[in-house]
């Protein structure tokens, strides 16, 4: 199986493999999926309930899916405050954002406590503009946050933002100090180790074949079965195989490249901290450096999954690597001779609002799910595991009753309309944002089609709720 840069590097450091499941076993809780969400949930449940028999199965190796392929950028949710207000109301939106904010420090303290070398650096997030159209695209949000006395963002001068990013293309931005970067695959492998140490039974190379929705659910794998009191579906984009979840998300790829190490060159241009950087387009450019002086740069330009089928799409090099590299070099022309040495792709389970949903699968009282992290799962899955813990424990608390549980979520169209529409909208976005890079305006039809895209960071007028 093709391994991207992050995961190959993590396996060089630690390559232990848990056994695959063979035979029939019983469990209090079976978690399907060994990424960030499944591992954080297993750890949180086990720490709170040491005697609970928790089994976790993973189709490949823990962290080999989206958790080990993303940009390694852990942001909080203040950028999603307006969308959360629409869904949850002001008070709940504030509580959820505060929980997401605390998750950043929780990652750092967890890594320190358990000796996980995930390269955690809490150096903040620069939300920038890379063309004139994007300038002040965050203003709707920051004005609303200030109105409620909540704004964590700091305005950065054009000179300072160019100095801190090292890029002449960046025109302006704001800064959130409470964000971090990590080596995501090393974090996932560390979570796996801690889960096993706590007593979670982990089975790798054990894909789900069938979920039997009986009173006591049964998880079937190629060579075994798990009868569990409770089941948690923590499969990220792979959860689209369930009809109830498929239309909650659209499956899209994000494509990434990594350069060779050039620490002195990056230090010379000012990009020598662990700051996370994004611009303000819908087809988001996001990047950061690594402690060894690489630039890791990503952009969603690749493929869409049809009807939940992603088995063969993402386990290969990125089909859009050349375009991603070209975009990276437009930000750093002074590094034109630093070679790109790796590229990869991974799936995003994108919802229309860009926020996850949690609940009972098909209304089954003993089967729970979380899906739709929309490319922001590094930090989000930490506090999302609190929701799963409360649902599994049947607690009547603030997390079981969180505004993100059992939302009346707006669905994507059925196939083949969703697949066809995704390409039409993506192509319109590419065209619209290409025009904006030239300080031009796309045509009326292109703008209307691009407006159908799922929500990104940039708030829209219809996000405002008084």
Image: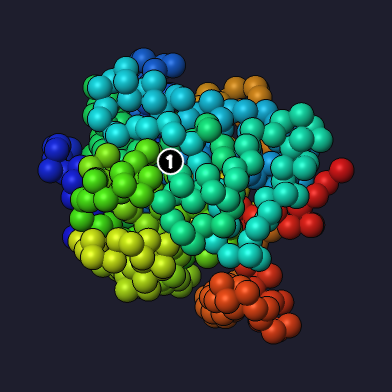
Q: Nearer the viewer, residue 87 or 392?
A: 87
Residue 315 image offset from top left, x and y in percent: 27, 63
Q: Nearer the viewer, residue 408 or 430?
A: 430
Residue 304 image offset from top left, x and y in percent: 45, 71
Q: Nearer the viewer, residue 327 or 255?
A: 327
Residue 7 image offset from top left, x and y in percent: 23, 48
For residue 258, above or below residue 417:
above
Q: Nearer the viewer, residue 15 or 240?
A: 15
Q: Would residue 118 appear left or right of 450 to someone viewing this image?
A: left
Residue 95 shows up from this direction: yes
For residue 406, above or below residue 455:
above
Look at 32% across and 73% down and name the residue there: 322
For residue 45, above or below residue 362:
above
Residue 391 image offset from top left, x and y in percent: 56, 30
Q: Would residue 367 appear left or right of 62 to someone viewing this image?
A: right
Look at 63% across and 61% down and name the residue there: 134
Look at 68% across and 56% down and name the residue there: 137
The residue at which mark 1 appears reads as 275
Q: How many marks?
A: 1
């Amino acid at each position: 199986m093709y391994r991207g840069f992050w995961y190959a590097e993590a396996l060089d450091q630690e390559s232990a493999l848990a056994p695959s499941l063979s035979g029939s076993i019983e469990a209090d809780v079976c978690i399907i999926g060994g990424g960030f969400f499944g591992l954080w949930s297993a750890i949180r449940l086990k720490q709170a309930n040491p005697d609970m028999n928790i089994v976790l199965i993973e189709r490949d190796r823990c962290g080999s899916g989206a958790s080990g392929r993303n940009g390694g950028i852990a942001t909080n949710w203040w950028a999603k405050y307006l969308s959360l207000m629409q869904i949850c109301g002001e008070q709940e939106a504030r509580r959820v954002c505060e929980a997401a904010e605390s998750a950043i420090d929780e990652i750092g303290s967890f890594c320190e406590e358990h000796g996980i070398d995930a390269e955690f650096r809490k150096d903040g997030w620069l939300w920038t503009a890379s063309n004139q159209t994007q300038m002040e695209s965050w203003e709707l949000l920051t004005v609303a946050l200030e109105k409620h006395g909540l704004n964590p963002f700091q305005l950065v001068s054009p000179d300072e933002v160019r100095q801190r990013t090292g890029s002449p293309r960046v025109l302006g931005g704001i800064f959130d100090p409470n964000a971090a970067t990590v080596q995501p695959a090393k974090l996932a492998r560390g979570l796996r180790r801690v889960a096993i140490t706590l007593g979670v039974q982990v089975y790798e190379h054990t894909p789900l074949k069938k979920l039997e929705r009986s009173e006591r659910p049964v998880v079937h794998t190629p060579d075994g079965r798990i009868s569990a009191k409770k089941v948690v579906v923590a499969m990220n984009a792979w959860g689209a195989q369930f009809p109830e979840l498929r239309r909650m998300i659209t499956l899209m790829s994000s494509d990434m490249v990594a350069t060779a190490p050039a620490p002195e060159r990056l230090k010379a241009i000012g990009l020598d901290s662990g700051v996370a950087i994004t611009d303000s387009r819908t087809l988001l450019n996001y990047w950061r450096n690594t402690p060894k002086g690489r630039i890791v740069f990503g952009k969603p330009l690749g493929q869409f999954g049809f009807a939940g089928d992603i088995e063969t799409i993402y386990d290969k090099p990125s089909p859009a690597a050349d375009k991603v590299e070209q975009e990276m070099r437009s930000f750093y022309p002074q590094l034109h001779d630093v070679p790109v040495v790796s590229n990869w792709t991974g799936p995003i389970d994108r919802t229309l609002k860009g926020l996850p949903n949690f609940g009972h699968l098909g209304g089954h009282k003993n089967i729970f799910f979380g899906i739709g992290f929309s490319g922001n799962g590094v930090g989000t899955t930490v506090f999302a595991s609190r929701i799963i813990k409360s649902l599994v424990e049947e607690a009547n608390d603030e997390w079981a009753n969180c505004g993100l549980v059992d939302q009346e979520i707006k669905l994507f169209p059925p196939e083949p309309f969703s697949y066809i529409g995704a390409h039409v909208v993506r192509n319109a976005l590419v065209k619209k944002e290409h025009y904006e890079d030239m300080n031009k305006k796309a045509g009326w039809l292109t703008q209307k089609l691009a407006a159908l895209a799922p929500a990104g960071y940039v708030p829209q007028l219809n996000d405002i709720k008084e």
